[in-house]
Amino acid sequence: MTQAGKRTGKILVVDDDAAIRTVVGQALKRDGHRVVTAATIAEAEMQLAASLPDVLVTDVVLPDGNGLDLVERIVAAHPGLPAIVLSAQNTLTTAVRSNEVGAFDYLPKPFDLDALSQSVQSALARGSGGLLEPTEGEDKTLPLIGRSPAMQDVYRIIARVVSNDLTVLVSGESGTGKELVARAIHDLGPRRLAPFLALNMAAIPRELIEAELFGHERGAFTGAQARSAGRFEQAAGGTLFLDEIGDMPMEAQTRLLRVLQSGEFTTVGGARTIRADVRIVAATNRDLAQLVGIGQFREDLFYRLNVVPVTLPALRARRQDIALLARHFLDRAVEDGLPRKQLAADAVAVLEAYEWPGNVRELENMMRRMSVLARDERIDAAEVRTMLGDAAPQRTIGDTGIEAAIHARLARMSVEEPTALDDGTLYDRIIAEVERPLIEALLMRHGNNQLRAAKALGINRNTLRKRLDVLGIPS
């Protein structure tokens, strides 16, 4: 069935939150779908037994079990039924597990209704369950930490590539965790029992890179007294991580391109062809497209490497992950035998205001240093400022705009009213706090002329009047 060019169908929405069931149900009904809902796995299974839907949309944490277990059973019994997983447990593990059980898509909460609508459309159009084949093995706690939207995008890409051998190019600033992405792809994929080898192109003399990659025969060059296997041979069956690929010399780029094209190579000084059985994950902190433009990187190699691009955000672009990362590193320091430390709320605010030019690596080093040098178990803002010193520019909370003000407001709330951070009202409260001064400023700027203020805001006058009433602003 179609409606205005869209496919429509029966959608089963499973979530124990009545508000989410209502909002999602209304949005899908507006798209022309027929929606049935369930609050538990038991209710969902009753609905499924009565009549199969065209698409299943389910939360993970449900009162009587795990929604991923439901997906696994349903996809096994009905391979043509697409399942879309919604989860507030926004970790790489959840994203990967969703794909392992055969979910069609994974959307972290809070999700965008348009994104859900598009996912349902794609599911109906494809009419097939599961983007990836399930992989065997135990789920793991992985070193990639973060619940920010930027990291959710990274998790979703990783979840889609772990079960295949597509070449992945990871880009991002130094210290963002590019090798951790490569290790996650390896550890979760079918090659995980084979070697994972890393080679940093920037750390090897130019004249030795080809021998490092492909190996050499005895007498191939001065000092080659015996045959030596290169990384392609050593990593056979596993994954080869080529870090700082942008620093690779042009002549070595040519040989690497031939290997990627043919799947074969020869050692330096050798004649025997060797089959290359490795997955390639490359990484760079440079703009390869720009290097191609100035003739410092082969265009054909760039396209061979850039099959699946993964862009890691800088830490300053995901400040909401800083507290989570900091506490993770403090816990890991304890596992390594260092003293236990805890961060005060004002200390977290200072960490979130810092620019972190060294990204996650700098934050990890900072936490380890604090584990050793901080005087008390509880680390406060003054201690953090002392540790940071003049290492890099630090934003002063309160004088650098809306973003810093929001970070400061959240830090204050975590001390004064911590339950407000989890009671489901945070969005409305923060929006109201931002909206009120914005509207008041526009009214003042336009001499209390509501029509002009509404025009400047991009809303109509009636909407402005309603907001004035809601916010208690005199009109």
Image (spheres, rainbow, N blue to C red):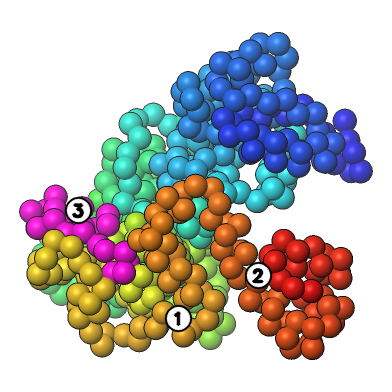
- Amino acid type at circle 1 is Gly
How many neighbours does mark 1 have within 10 angstroms: few (below 14), some (14-19), or many (20 or more)?
some
Q: Quadrant of the C terminus?
A: bottom right
Between label 2 and label 3, give the one nearer the viewer: 2
Residue 154 visible: no
Magenta span of residues = 327-348
Q: CA distance from mark 1 to mark 2?
A: 17 Å
Instruction: Using the image, determine if residue 139 lies above or below residue 405.
Output: above
How many neighbours does mark 3 have within 10 angstroms: few (below 14), some (14-19), or many (20 or more)?
some
- Amino acid type at circle 2 is Glu
**According to the image, label 3 marks what residue?**
332
The local secondary structure at tag 3 comes to: helix
Q: Position of residue 66 (x, y in %)?
A: 47, 27
The local secondary structure at tag 2 comes to: helix
Do the residues under discs 2 and 3 have CB atoms within 8 angstroms?
A: no
Residue 333 within the magenta-colored segment of the rendering: yes
Left/right placement of residue 213 relative to residue 83 reads: left
Q: Position of residue 390 (x, y in %)?
A: 26, 88
Instruction: Using the image, determine if residue 66 lies above or below residue 374.
Output: above
Mark 3 and mark 1 lie on one chain; the one further toward the N terminus is: 3
Q: Name which quarter of the figure residue 131 lies in.
A: top right
Q: Nearer the viewer, residue 446 or 216?
A: 446
Q: Name which quarter of the figure residue 132 lies in.
A: top right
Q: Nearer the viewer, residue 249 or 409?
A: 409
Left/right placement of residue 370 relative to residue 162 reads: left
Instruction: Using the image, determine if residue 32 lies above or below residue 173.
Output: above
Mark 2 and mark 3 lie on one chain; the one further toward the N terminus is: 3
Q: CA distance from mark 2 to mark 3?
A: 41 Å
- Amino acid type at circle 3 is Arg
Mark 1 and mark 2 lie on one chain; the one further toward the N terminus is: 1
Q: Position of residue 409 (x, y in %)?
A: 46, 68
**According to the image, label 1 marks what residue?**
398
